[in-house]
């Protein structure tokens, strides 16, 4: 017959277990990015999209509008301030440092002259069109994925805020370079319509001391606004905006569809089994060959950005170096902005998870019930 002390052991064990459990921390301020820690993040912040009607767009956790403004007004305000400053610089500011250029009879037949005397053509893609497309197309695609795919408001908010980071800051950056450094566009001499000093001999009779350098204010007779615009070739704003916007989109698509990773796509990383896939990925199990259509999807934004950039060489508004530097600036800001909005850029375990400050952790008390 069991003793009284033996009968009390289960109760004591239960009490001890409850005591130990109560001492465990409920949350930590420094979250780990290990696969096991992703289980809570992915389950709580991103319910399984299969719980929703796939044909109807919507978020599972939309905040109140005032909550959204409280979390984002500062970032939205600084982005608008950057864009307004860029617009004012571009529209009204004169070149800070003078652009000197040689001028003599027959200058158009020299290598420098042929480089800067191209005909003045209308832009294939205007500045306004480039700015709208560079923002609207990536925003629409990322918004559609958030509405129909991840269903997470935090993800959509982080994507749009990050896109704004990239475009607004890159635009301001290249505007300052245009004003302070700049450069003469390929059609500069056509716009300038300079008065060539009659006392200077032609190329065949050049002697030491015959070559003189001038600034636009000294010799140009063309329209003042066009002459000012023709001195802002470096870097290419079209190229910078295209690579900032579409480069950010490419990084987003890579994160959601796991292009440069072990395979899968965003639906595998959201929902009930998301942490299991992350743990298998950490161990190296279940590696998959990435399908070719994902590569096409990833490079499509880069291709669009390249076409935008090269169009500025084709219409003789920019030199190749202007386009290349603008592309580098845009790509740099796209990467920095993505890292500021998401946990990583190329780590497939975490690059699809938005940071808390970008909308992924809105006040739960102010989130509308579905």
Image: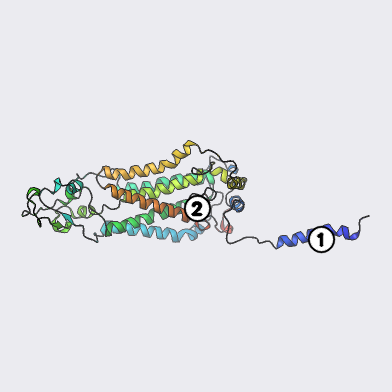
Name the outermost residue toward the left.
199
Name the outermost residue toward the top.
292
The residue located at (55%, 39%) in the rendering is 288
> x, y (%) of residue 341?
48, 54
The residue located at (77%, 61%) in the rendering is 16
Q: In the figure, is residue 198 to the left or right of 264?
A: left
Residue 234's mark? none
> x, y (%) of residue 119?
19, 44
Please tell me which of labels 1 and 2 falls first in the chain.
1
Spatial separation of the CA atoms under disc 1 and disc 2: 47 Å
> Residue 279, relative to residue 90: is it above or below?
above
> x, y (%) of residue 146?
50, 47
Task: Give the color scheme: rainbow, by chain, secondary structure or one colour.
Answer: rainbow
Question: 368 or 88, which is in the foreground?
Answer: 88
Give the crowd class for mark 2: few <14, some 14-19, many >=20 residues within 10 Å. Answer: many
Picture quadrant of residue 221: bottom left
Callout 1 secondary element? helix
Question: 211 or 147, which is in the foreground?
Answer: 211
Residue 27 visible? The answer is: yes
Residue position marked by numbered label 2 in the rendering: 344
Residue position marked by numbered label 1 in the rendering: 12
Give the crowd class for mark 1: few <14, some 14-19, many >=20 residues within 10 Å. Answer: few
Residue 87 visible? The answer is: no
Name the outermost residue toward the front.
208
CB atoms at circles 1 and 2 under 8 Å apart? no
Q: In the figure, is residue 340 to the left or right of 368?
A: left
The residue located at (56%, 51%) in the rendering is 61
Q: Quadrant of the N terminus?
A: bottom right
Callout 2 secondary element? loop
> x, y (%) of residue 27?
62, 60
């Amino acid at each position: 017959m069991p003793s009284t002390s033996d009968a009390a052991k289960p109760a004591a064990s239960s009490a001890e277990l409850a005591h130990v459990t109560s001492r465990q921390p409920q949350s930590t301020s420094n979250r780990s990015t290990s696969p096991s820690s992703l289980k809570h993040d992915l389950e709580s912040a991103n319910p399984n999209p299969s719980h929703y009607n796939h044909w109807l767009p919507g978020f599972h956790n939309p905040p109140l509008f005032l909550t959204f403004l409280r979390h984002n007004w500062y970032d939205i305000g600084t982005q608008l301030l950057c864009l307004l400053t860029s617009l004012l610089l571009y529209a009204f500011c004169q070149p800070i440092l003078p652009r000197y250029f040689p001028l003599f009879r027959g200058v158009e037949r020299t290598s420098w002259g042929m480089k800067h005397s191209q005909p003045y053509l209308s832009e294939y893609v205007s500045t306004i069109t480039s700015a709208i497309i560079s923002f609207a197309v990536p925003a629409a695609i990322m918004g559609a994925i958030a509405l129909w795919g991840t269903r997470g408001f935090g993800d959509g908010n982080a994507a749009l805020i990050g896109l704004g980071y990239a475009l607004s800051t890159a635009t301001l950056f290249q505007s300052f370079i245009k004003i302070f450094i700049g450069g003469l566009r390929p059609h500069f001499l056509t716009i300038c319509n300079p008065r060539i000093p009659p006392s200077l001999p032609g190329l065949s009779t050049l002697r030491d001391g015959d070559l003189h350098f001038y600034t636009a204010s000294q010799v140009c007779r063309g329209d003042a606004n066009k002459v000012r615009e023709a001195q802002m070739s470096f870097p290419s704003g079209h190229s910078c905006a295209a690579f900032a916007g579409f480069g950010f989109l490419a990084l987003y698509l890579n994160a959601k569809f796991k292009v440069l990773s072990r395979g899968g796509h965003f639906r595998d990383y959201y929902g009930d089994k998301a942490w299991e896939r992350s743990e298998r990925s950490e161990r190296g199990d279940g590696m998959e060959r990435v399908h070719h259509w994902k590569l096409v999807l990833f490079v499509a934004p880069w291709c669009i950005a390249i076409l935008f950039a090269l169009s500025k060489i084709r219409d003789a508004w920019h030199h190749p170096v202007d386009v290349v530097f603008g592309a580098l600036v845009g790509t740099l800001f796209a990467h920095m902005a993505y890292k500021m909005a998401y946990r990583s850029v190329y780590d497939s375990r975490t690059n699809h998870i938005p940071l808390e400050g970008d909308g992924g952790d809105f006040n739960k008390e102010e989130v509308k019930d579905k």
